[in-house]
Image (spheres, helix red, strand yellow):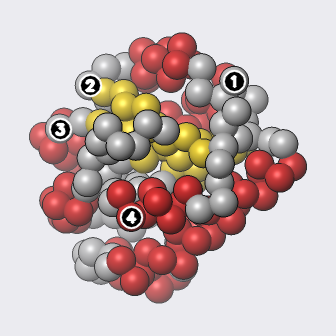
Amino acid sequence: MANFIVLMGVSGSGKTVIGKALAPKLNAEFIDGDNLHSQRNVDKMAAGIPLTDADRLDWLQLIAKVGREHAAHGTTCIIACSALKKSYRDLLRIDNDSIRFIYLKGSFDLIHDRILKRSHQYMPASLLQSQFDTLEEPQFDEPDVFTVSVDQGISEIIGEIVKADLIS
């Protein structure tokens, strides 16, 4: 049973929108991982500077801890977290046996268009290329990852995820 679901993908892939819509369907709490970043990381991104692996380490460890706490209490949480590299996903897996990832996959052009149409507290469109450059798409050796295309409506995305029955 998955008590810890990570909605992953590049900025603008819909993690927050999907997470907020999915949580009630799965009787889960939604947590936006953006809100768990340190102020230093927020300031860096707001200045258009991509985060390094070292910058992300404390953030990823905090997300993993939150997931473990939910699992320990028998509750389900959905956390929006880019989890761009396999090493990041592996860190989130440590002591989180009930983790599942949902990869919100989309093309650069589609997501860039979405970012230009939205307002975000600190993630400028100029950083999207760095996210795609960093992205290591999940492969066959990550069976706990469910991939869904974001080239469709929110209700269709939610429907695919619910049908996948990730928390039973």
Report the residue at 58% width, 49% height from top. 79
The numbered dot on residue 168 is 1
Report the residue at 26% width, 54% height from top. 136
Q: In which quarter of the image is the C terminus?
A: top right
Q: Nearer the N terminus, badge 3 or badge 4? A: 4
Classify residue 20 by image quadrant: top right
Which residue lies under the disc numbered 2? 151
What residue type is disc 2 on?
Answer: Asp
Please tell me how crowded label 3 is: few (under 14), some (14-19), or many (20+) other residues with Cα within 10 Å. Answer: few
Of circles 3 and 4, which is in front?
Answer: 4
Which residue lies under the disc numbered 3? 107
Which residue lies under the disc numbered 4? 87
| Marks 2 & 3, CB-CB < 8 Å contact | yes
Q: In this view, does 124 lie above or below 72?
A: below
Q: In this view, does 64 lie above or below 96?
A: below
**What x and y, as percent, mark residue 140?**
32, 37
| Marks 3 & 1, CB-CB < 8 Å contact | no
Q: Which of 25 and 121 is in front in this view?
A: 25
Distance, label 2 to label 4, CA atoms, is 27 Å
Element on which disc 3 rests:
loop
What residue type is disc 1 on?
Answer: Ser
Of circles 3 and 1, which is in front?
Answer: 1
Q: Nearer the N terminus, badge 2 or badge 3? A: 3
